[in-house]
């Protein structure tokens, strides 16, 4: 195709030349003293074009000859630049391949080539990346002194240079991650606090903050961070739900009195307070601190809408209510009996209703429900033991020592 185009262009030139020059009878005359030179206009034009071509070629040749040392210098700089880039790529490959000693040597070789070449010294981003690779390799090799020195140089250079400013964020995130590996949560939190607001809300930064807050045993802050991560889809839905519940449990367990527990409960997100598992754990914790009425108040909305809960959620609210039985009022009986009528085969609900009836001294009804819960193998061992102990207490109330002993023995035999 290219040859056809050249042939077409050649024909076009031939046609144009024949059209314009074929009938050109003009003359060009040069006078010099007594000399006179006549040339046809066509020959003059050809000589003029040839002379211009020769002059341009000569000028380019002179420029090439004069600029030869500069081009040789540029070639040497380019070769060293390629060598430095190759060393940096080799350091990356060795680092990701787990050869941290070789990666450190390659990164240091790249830095040495750049240091020995003044023309490459202005590439600050290259320098920062090389320092970070060397620092990462030193961290993997447990060389904390070398890691901190390389990291310090990377941070100093990135803060001074606008071209390497983007690498500063990566350096600070890496520093925070390494601080967490060293179990130095305060240092990690300090580095994360220095990040710009946009960077601090990135998924990786939030993950690091979550680890730091958990390491510092700050479940409330960890819960807020985990909720942000869940909002940014940093976890799957199931994993996020499990993590949020776990952190909520940790927050509740840190309360040492009922006032502190109330504050923790009110600081929870409404979504957490509507979680039956969290509410059941909060009720159990409140009951252990003596606030049984308040514990039942937290559970009441769930018992009023028991049909909206899954089987596991009904077990959670039932266990929470079992812990909050002391002082339960008669207004709960209708609610509990309706729940048992709706789910007569669930041992957890039978246990809660039985404990409530026993608390109200309705021992005949309570015994049947407690026996159902005690013999329900699907129920947790702790709940079954609670049922057997309740049966033993009922037997003691009726002065039936044989039945009480049998109930205590059955509770002790549970694994």
Image: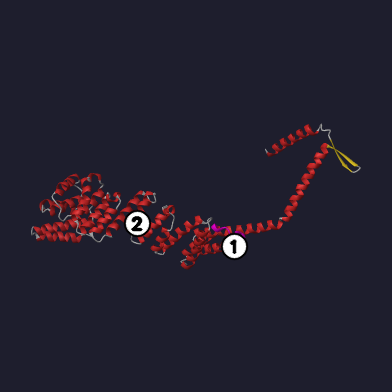
Q: How many marks?
A: 2
Q: State the separation of the CA atoms marked 2 and 1.
A: 45 Å
Residue visible at 17% across and 48% down in the picture:
336
The percent position of residue 238, horizontal first and vertical second, equals 34, 50
Q: Are marks 2 and 1 in contact (CB under 8 Å)?
A: no
Asked if one can make out residue 259 in the rendered structure from this viewpoint, the answer is yes
Q: Which residue is mark 2?
A: 222
Neighbours of disc 2 within 10 Å: few (<14), some (14-19), many (20+): many
In the image, is 149 to the left or to the right of 309?
right
Q: Hey, which quadrant is residue 182 in on the image?
A: bottom left
| Mark 2 or 1, nearer chain start | 1
Judging depth in this view, the residue of 274 and 408 nearest the camera is 274
Judging depth in this view, the residue of 10 and 386 nearest the camera is 10
Instruction: State the predominant SS element of the stretch in magenta.
Output: helix
Quadrant of the drawing holding the N terminus = top right
Q: Which residue is mark 1?
A: 113
Q: Magenta residues, as a range?
A: 114-125
Q: Hey, which quadrant is residue 397 in on the image?
A: bottom left
Going by the picture, which residue comes out furthest to the front? 33
């Amino acid at each position: 195709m290219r040859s056809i185009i050249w042939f077409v262009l050649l024909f076009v030139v031939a046609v144009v030349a024949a059209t314009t020059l074929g009938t050109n009878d003009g003359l060009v005359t040069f006078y010099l003293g007594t000399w006179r030179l006549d040339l046809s206009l066509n020959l003059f034009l050809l000589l003029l074009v040839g002379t211009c071509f020769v002059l341009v070629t000569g000028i380019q040749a002179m420029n090439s000859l004069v600029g030869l040392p500069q081009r040789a210098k540029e070639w040497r700089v380019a070769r060293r630049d390629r060598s430095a880039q190759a060393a940096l790529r080799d350091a990356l490959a060795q680092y990701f391949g787990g050869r941290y000693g070789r990666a450190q040597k390659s990164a240091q070789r790249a830095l040495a080539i750049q240091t020995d070449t003044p023309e490459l010294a202005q590439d600050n981003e290259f320098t920062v990346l090389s320092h970070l690779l060397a620092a990462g390799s030193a961290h993997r090799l447990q060389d904390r002194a070398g890691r901190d020195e390389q990291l310090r140089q990377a941070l100093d250079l990135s803060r001074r240079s606008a071209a390497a400013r983007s690498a500063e964020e990566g350096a600070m995130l890496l520093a925070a991650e390494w601080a967490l590996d060293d179990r130095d949560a305060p240092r990690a939190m300090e580095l994360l606090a220095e990040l710009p607001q946009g960077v601090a809300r990135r998924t990786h930064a939030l993950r690091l903050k979550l680890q730091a807050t958990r390491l510092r045993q700050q479940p409330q802050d960890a819960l807020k961070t985990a909720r942000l991560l869940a909002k940014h889809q940093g976890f799957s839905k199931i994993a996020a739900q499990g993590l949020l519940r776990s952190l909520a449990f940790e927050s509740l367990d840190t309360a040492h009195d009922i006032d502190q527990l109330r504050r923790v409960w009110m600081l929870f997100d409404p979504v957490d307070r509507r979680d039956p598992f969290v509410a059941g754990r909060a009720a159990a914790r409140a009951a252990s601190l003596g606030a049984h009425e308040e514990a039942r108040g937290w559970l009441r909305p769930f018992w009023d809408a028991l049909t909206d809960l899954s089987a596991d959620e009904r077990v959670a609210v039932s266990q929470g209510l079992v812990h909050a039985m002391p002082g339960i009022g008669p207004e709960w009986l209708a609610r509990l009996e309706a729940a048992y009528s709706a789910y007569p085969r669930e041992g957890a609900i039978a246990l809660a209703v039985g404990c409530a009836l026993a608390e109200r001294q309705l021992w005949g009804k309570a015994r049947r429900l407690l026996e159902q819960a005690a013999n329900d193998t699907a129920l947790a061992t702790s709940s079954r033991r609670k049922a057997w102990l309740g049966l033993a207490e009922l037997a003691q109330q009726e002065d039936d020592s044989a039945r009480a002993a049998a109930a205590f023995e059955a509770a002790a035999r549970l694994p």
